[in-house]
Image: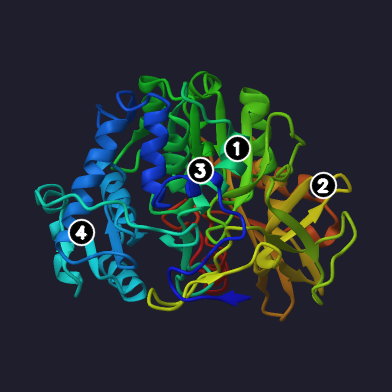
Amino acid sequence: MTTAPPHALDSAIAPASVTQVSSGNLVELLEASARAHGRLERTAYIDDGVEYSFRAVFEGAEQAAAAFAGRGLGLGSRILIALPDGMDFVWAFLGALRIGAVAIPVNSMFHPDEMARAARVAEPAAVVASSQFEELFTAPVLTADRLLGSGGAVPRFADCSPGTPAFAAFTSGTTGGPKLCFHTHADPEILDRAAGEAIGVTEDDVCYSVPRMNFAYGLGNSLFFPLLRGAVTVLSGRRLAPADCLALLARHGVTVYYSQPTFFAHMLGHSEAAEVLGGLRAAVVAGEVLPQALERRLRAILGERLLNVYGTTEIGHALLVNGAGAYREFTLGRVLEPYRLRVVDEAGQPVAPGIEGRLELAGPTIGPGVAHGSDAPLRLAPQEWYATSDAATVDPDGYVRVYGRLDDVEIVGGINVHPTEIEDRLMEHPAVKEAAVCAVRRDSGVSALRAFVVLRAGVDAKSAHGVRQELLATAEATLTWYKVPEDVVFVPSLPRNHVGKLLRRTVRAQAADGSLGP
């Protein structure tokens, strides 16, 4: 692993278009690209029903940059952005990059304790947030009104090398405290040439992303790809319920839609889902393993227009896309250039095709997380391998299958079991909405599998008994004996984090203490 001080993270692969703008600044590139393609007067965003042109995007970024510069912020300053998705976020983010600062988005819906923890990690020189959070921060807080109403002189684009840090994204913190992964002014175009190209965003598209822009994935969906490619993006400050999201997709004629498996599953519970989703050019799913039963339901509507993708915060977006032209059922497709991958055993040695092991990645945008914003950002050289926490196999012709995190594996009778394989079988039952499987220790000291199942609306208690028997019978008929749950417990809901990911550690803990139950 290589380390370097801030502002000196030169990538070995620098997009030519970044180096061709005089400052090397990503915001100058975006503005120059919009001008060269005649897009300045075209609609870039629709926020709360109001349309904003590409020109308005860059003029707002100028105002934000002036406000930041007027407060002494500049190259290398860390600016925490605690705003919901909307134009204020876009302007603050681009304004920070324009002056060479490092934008650090954070979930604006965090509990105050979580927000304070994020600030301790980021160690920002300034914060952009609503006035309700002002007491949480030791750094000065700029509200959106202060940011866009300063009237100060607009600073020039800060001079940046392709390796100058541009933004830092928080990891989810599901396996420890959240860390910051730094990405450079060159990274977004590399990511766009990989995932943006595979998704195929064009000027004719209207995009909407359920994942927020406080995630690296959401930034690509709602900011980098559409601004680089000239698409329209719909923004929503509040998190929409599935029915409201379907209405938004239909109202704005969305053609490219990004969401998580769980949210797609909830959407399919509405009668209009097939018609609305069927009208999409591309439906992109990411964030957790896509259950096979859900993939079948979505592909029945979308065919190869369903793109199952995989990436990490450390990478910055996706490097695997399973969709049109590279589709294979229940896989994540093949790795996208300029990235590489391999699967290794416990000793770190590559395994043969089809053998399960740890997924490792290599490429020019990988920034492992650091504990504090003031720490020197970490970057791997393009040839260095980054070890993920995911279990995977690679088919002989390069198609990748990811089974979940290595620490999600349950051990039953000394044998490793992937809960997702069992959950896929359970979720094929028409009465099952969600399922989670974990090992529990019986009074005898023996570990056995238990399935926790959320039933669909309308399944009564009398019917539930029959469903339980059918689920156990299906498991016995289709799974190896040690993968068959000993019992099925029906629960009203399963613990998930704020982006919808199943909290398996919480499932295990609540299963152990008996609190996960009816």
Judging depth in this view, the residue of 162 and 201 nearest the camera is 162
Please name the residue that numbered disc 2 is placed on: 398
In x, y percent, where is residue 289?
Answer: 63, 50
Q: Which dot, 1 or 4, sits closer to the camera? A: 4
* Residue 332, placed above or below residue 489: above
Q: Which mark is residue 55?
A: none
Q: Is residue 437 left or right of residue 186?
A: right
What separation in Å lies between label 2 and label 1 (alpha carbons)?
36 Å
**N-term mark: 2 or 1:** 2
Tell me the residue at 55%/62% (across/down): 314
Judging from the image, the colouring scheme is rainbow
Assign the N terminus to one quadrant of the image.
Answer: bottom right
Q: Residues within 10 Å of mark 4 (few under 14, many from 20)?
A: many
What separation in Å lies between label 1 and label 3 (alpha carbons)?
52 Å
Judging depth in this view, the residue of 511 and 411 nearest the camera is 411
Please name the residue that numbered disc 1 is placed on: 431
Please name the residue that numbered disc 4 is placed on: 68
**N-term mark: 2 or 3:** 3
**N-term mark: 4 or 2:** 4
What separation in Å lies between label 1 and label 4 (alpha carbons)?
54 Å
In x, y percent, where is residue 358?
Answer: 74, 65
**N-term mark: 1 or 3:** 3
Give the amino acid type for the residue marked by disc 4 in the picture: Phe
In x, y percent, where is residue 237?
Answer: 28, 42
Please name the residue that numbered disc 3 is placed on: 17
SS at circle 1: loop
Marks 4 and 2: CB-CB under 8 Å?
A: no
Give the amino acid type for the residue marked by disc 3 in the picture: Ser
Q: Is residue 154 left or right of residue 236?
A: left
What separation in Å lies between label 4 and label 3 (alpha carbons)?
26 Å
Judging depth in this view, the residue of 139 and 425 nearest the camera is 139
